[in-house]
Image (tube, grey):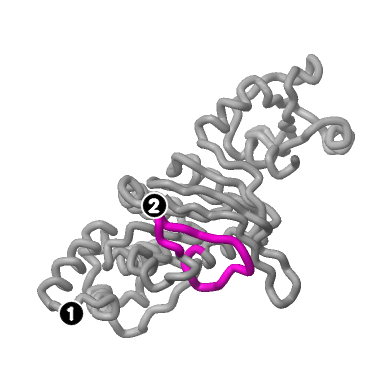
């Protein structure tokens, strides 16, 4: 368990990134959702001991992360939004090098763990290729491979599927899903579908605060019979936005404008119910 209590962080430019934030995170995939600038990356960097909070505490079980960073780092794997690689080295060579840096001195032990993480991330067939030639999805999977070398119990990944094509995204998420079955995996994203597919728990963060912590399944259940839709026009849409809680507007396959609203009861006879989505819950939470 990671237990975060009353965490605050203000940067030198005056931006308050974390504002008295408290959150408990257990084993499994935990999704962090929020708009750009919500504080997700600041929270993850703080948990990863890359920056000090101004106040508050973070405990991993009985270990005080803020006071004993080195002890926690032995249990930690971190994948930031972007990471660099050496241009001329293969995946196999780089992973061996990183394993040395992580204290695995035995060549035999390194060979075993490197082969293991290459198989786990579906990169074994490409192990001889230079990582600089990898696609975006392969690079992200390589990032997961390197963080798994020390068999961490806490894994933090920040916006890992940004820029990936659908096939690469699926392969990457499958790797994370396997890892999350027995570890704490904190997964930050602005893609609501990623959380719906992966996570058993989630939190929505904005302006440095946790707005809600919930199971995605329960979040969806809470909206049953409360999401309504109708065909509309641009002119009517402006009026609807002033009259009710509009969640989104979209064009259907016939290029007709539709609006989706949240209401406890049918707004009027022109509206019909539609299936609720996690994205609807996300928008409703941000509007509160």
Q: Residues within 10 Å of mark 2 (few under 14, many from 20)?
A: many
Residue 23, given in percent of the width and then of the height, sits at 55, 49
Left or right of residue 43, residue 30 in this image? left
Residue 36 vertical position relative to residue 228 in the rendered view, above or below = below
Give the structural element (helix, strand or loop) at label 2: strand
Look at the image and give the residue range highlighted in magenta: 47-64
Estimate the spatial distance between the alpha carbons at disc 1 and disc 2, rounded to whole Å. Answer: 27 Å
Q: Which residue is mark 2?
A: 184
Q: Residues within 10 Å of mark 1 (few under 14, many from 20)?
A: few
- Residue at x 54%, y 60% (from the top left corner): 57
Position of residue 50 measured from the top left corner of the image (x, y, whole percent): 50, 73
Residue 283 is left or right of residue 195, and the answer is: right
Position of 75 relative to 24 (above/below) = below
Query: Which residue was labeled with disc 1?
Result: 105
User: Can residue 170 be seen in this snapshot?
Assistant: yes
- Apparent side of residue 243 relative to residue 127 in the rendered image (left or right): right
Task: Identify the residue at the far top of this view.
Answer: 269
Q: Tell me if residue 55 is in the magenta stretch.
A: yes
Task: Classify 191 as above or below 71.
Answer: above
């Amino acid at each position: 368990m990671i237990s975060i209590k009353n965490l605050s962080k203000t940067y030198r430019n005056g931006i308050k990134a974390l504002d008295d934030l408290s959150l408990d995170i257990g084993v499994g995939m935990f999704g962090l959702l929020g708009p750009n600038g919500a504080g997700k990356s600041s929270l993850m960097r703080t948990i990863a001991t890359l920056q000090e909070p101004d106040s508050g505490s973070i405990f991993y079980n009985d270990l005080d992360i803020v006071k004993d960073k080195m002890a926690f780092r032995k249990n930690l794997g971190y994948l930031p939004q972007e990471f660099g690689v050496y241009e001329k080295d293969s995946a196999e060579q780089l992973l061996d090098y990183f394993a040395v840096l992580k204290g695995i001195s035995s060549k035999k032990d390194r060979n075993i763990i490197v082969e293991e993480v290459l198989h786990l991330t579906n990169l074994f067939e490409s192990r001889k290729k230079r990582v600089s030639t990898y696609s975006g999805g392969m690079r992200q999977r390589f990032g997961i491979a390197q963080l798994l070398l020390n068999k961490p119990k806490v894994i933090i990944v920040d916006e890992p599927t940004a820029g990936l094509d659908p096939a690469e995204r699926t392969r990457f998420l499958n790797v994370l899903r396997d890892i999350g079955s027995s570890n704490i995996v904190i997964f930050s994203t602005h893609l609501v579908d990623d959380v719906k597919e992966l996570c058993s728990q989630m939190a929505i963060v904005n302006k440095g605060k946790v707005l809600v912590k919930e199971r995605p399944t329960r979040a969806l259940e809470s909206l049953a019979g409360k999401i309504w839709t109708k065909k509309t026009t641009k002119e009517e849409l402006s009026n609807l936005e002033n009259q009710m809680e509009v969640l989104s507007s979209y064009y259907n396959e016939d290029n007709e404008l539709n609006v989706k609203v949240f209401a406890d009861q049918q707004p009027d006879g022109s509206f019909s119910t539609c299936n609720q989505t996690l994205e609807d819950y996300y928008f409703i939470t941000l509007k509160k």
